[in-house]
Image: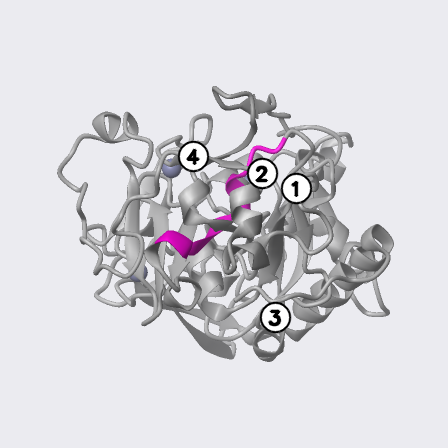
Amino acid sequence: MSQSVGGMSESTAAALLSKGLNHDKAAPSGPHETTKVAAQCHCGAVTFSVSLPVASLPLRGYMCHCSICRHAGGTYARIGVVLPPGVRPDWAGGSMPSDKTTSYEVPGRPTPQFFCSTCGSTIGGQGANGQWSMPVSLFDSKFWEIRVHGFPKSVPDGGLLEWLLPDATAAGAAGAEEIIWFSPDHGDSFVAAEPERAADGSERLRAECHCGGVSFTIPRPSQAVRDDAYLRDYVSPSDPMKWKAFLDLCRDCGRLSGATVVPWMLVPRVVIEPPVPADLGREEQQQHQHQHQHQQQQQQQPYGTLKTYKSSAPNTRGFCGVCGATALLATEHREPTAAQAVLNVAMGLLRAPEGVKAADWVTWRAGKPAWAEDAKGYDEEFTVSLVEGHRRWGVEKYGEAPEFDVI
Ligand SMILES: [Zn+2]
Ligand SMILES: [Zn+2]
Ligand SMILES: [Zn+2]
């Protein structure tokens, strides 16, 4: 989370920043009760716990909607928590396993972000003041409430903000703490991409991670796709020129992406250009395949930084080995033949000129985010707000909240 607060007096800004960083949640002096919460990346290579003063709970969690968090995460916002002063991760093995993590230096930011080198799970990083900021999805149980939003101007079409119920973005119900807005008026802003066209003049939608190491394009559904007995089901049911998109609240996606929700677009593998590497699929992944190559050399290839990770028996995921962005998912459930495989594309990577939701390219399954019942058991407040907010948005936009198969 950035520490700039725009459009207000310095003392007000400083007070809000202090609250956003949970400075008032530091452990009281003297003996106090603490609770220990376990956390780990998806593959378990990075495992730790934090001990939190019970009196400080819940901590304020944040959603950062800035372009760095979107393009280096693959989602619409980083969803995290800043650990209070004096609270540090208690790493298994004594220190953060630097041999198992990759750091990403973002230009203009004073400190790097870390992710697991094997599975790509976002680990977070330390601010200039030493406080750790980590995705909430790494933790096994909830100890935060989302009360901070960063860079709303970066999502002019509302991003996830538009899908949360008003209570989740306002002072809310009795007893709920007020929402803190960081840089509500300026700071990072949405840069509308130029529309892209292929050599034959057809439209292409660019997907690209923050470092640029993973970059590819998607066309409109073609007649060949609409004529294919299997692939036709992945064209929007309401618009033959759009694809299907849905929100995924499963814990695997959450742990891996640095957010508790991942927006996915479903796209036939054969239409993606350049072609997606063969190891993103049924083949066993080649671990650390690019480890010994120079980063610049990797980035000359369209998927030069892509790493793969088998997150479950049917699913293989692709993430950027340089910036850590969630990028692609291949599942055996959507691959009747090699030519008919349908991939998930992480929508935080998209560069649609009309906005982060790529509204001109997809129809949203607003009536049914995936794995919502599971997610309620993890974070009921956030899940209910998002599921209901998404549904209401769908009714407003489409007349009714669409529900369709995504497998
Ligand atoms: Zn891992
Ligand atoms: Zn951000
Ligand atoms: Zn990258």
**Disc 2 crowd, CA 10 A, few/some/many (<14, 14-19, 20+):** some
Of callouts 1 and 4, which one flags the residue occurring earlier in the amino acid sequence?
4
Residue type, label 2 = Arg
Ligand 2 closer than 8 Å to the CB at disc 3?
Answer: no
**CA–CA distance between discs 3 and 4?**
43 Å
Q: Quadrant of ligand 2?
A: top right
**Disc 3 crowd, CA 10 A, few/some/many (<14, 14-19, 20+):** some
- Which residue does the numbered mark 2 point to in the structure image? 220
Relative placement, left or right, of 401 versus 108 is right
Q: Quadrant of residue 151?
A: top right
Residue type, label 3 = Leu
Q: What is the magenta range?
A: 339-352
Q: Residue at position x 22%, y 56% from top?
A: 285
**CA–CA distance between discs 1 and 3?**
48 Å
Indicate the position of residue 194 as horizontal and vertical percent values: 60, 21
**Disc 4 crowd, CA 10 A, few/some/many (<14, 14-19, 20+):** many
Query: Is residue 327 placed above or below 297 in the rendered structure?
Result: below
Q: For residue 345: magenta? A: yes
- Which residue does the numbered mark 1 point to in the structure image? 241
Relative placement, left or right, of 134 versus 319 is right
- Give the label on residue 57, or none: 3
Residue type, label 1 = Met
- Which residue does the numbered mark 4 point to in the structure image? 216
